[in-house]
Image (cartoon, rainbow, N blue to C red):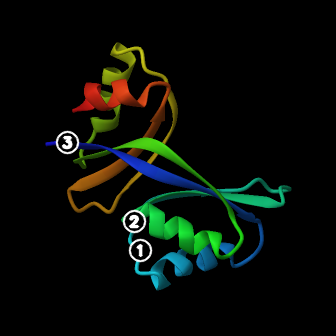
Amino acid sequence: MNVVREEIELQVITPNEPGIFGRVLATLANAGINLRAYCVQSEKDQEKGRFNLVTSDHKKAEAALRSLGYKIKATKVITVEVDDRIGVGAEIGALLAGAVIDVRYSYGSSAGAGRSLLVFKTSNDRKALKTLQ
């Protein structure tokens, strides 16, 4: 059974420097915040890093990270907890395509324990939520 939710993702802009990954995640851990999903990226010659974070408490996470001076934007995303099996992503993609919903970005992960968490930002999150429920 899929568990579909609308959640808040924090988009955090940081300096692109050695140790920033650990610093951001340690800040959340030290504040007692569980990290449910993340995507981290930077370009080779960019001075900034970007973290997309879905946490157990987005307000507390935002406060903790703002105390370090990082620029943060909160945005709604759709999370889908699914069975970890071959083809599940294709099935979700087909459902969204059938509803004429564009996927702006997505990321997810599985540890092979039977369940995966997928995160989607779409052209119409409200419609995506209804489509995937």
Amino acid type of the residue that numbered disc 3 sits on in the rendered structure: Asn
Disc number for residue 57: 2
The residue shown at (63%, 69%) is 66
Mark 3 closeness class: few <14, some 14–19, many ≥20 residues within 10 Å: some
The residue shown at (28%, 37%) is 88
| Residue 117 position in % (x across, y down) | 33, 52
Amino acid type of the residue that numbered disc 2 sits on in the rendered structure: Asp
Disc number for residue 2: 3
Q: CA distance from mark 2 to mark 3?
A: 22 Å
Between marks 3 and 1 in the image, the one whose residue lies nearer the viewer: 1
Mark 1 closeness class: few <14, some 14–19, many ≥20 residues within 10 Å: some
Q: Which residue is mark 1?
A: 33
Residue 93 visible to an observer of this rendering? no
Taking 119 as reference, is 130 above or below it?
above
Q: Secondary structure at mark 3?
A: loop
Q: Secondary structure at mark 2?
A: loop
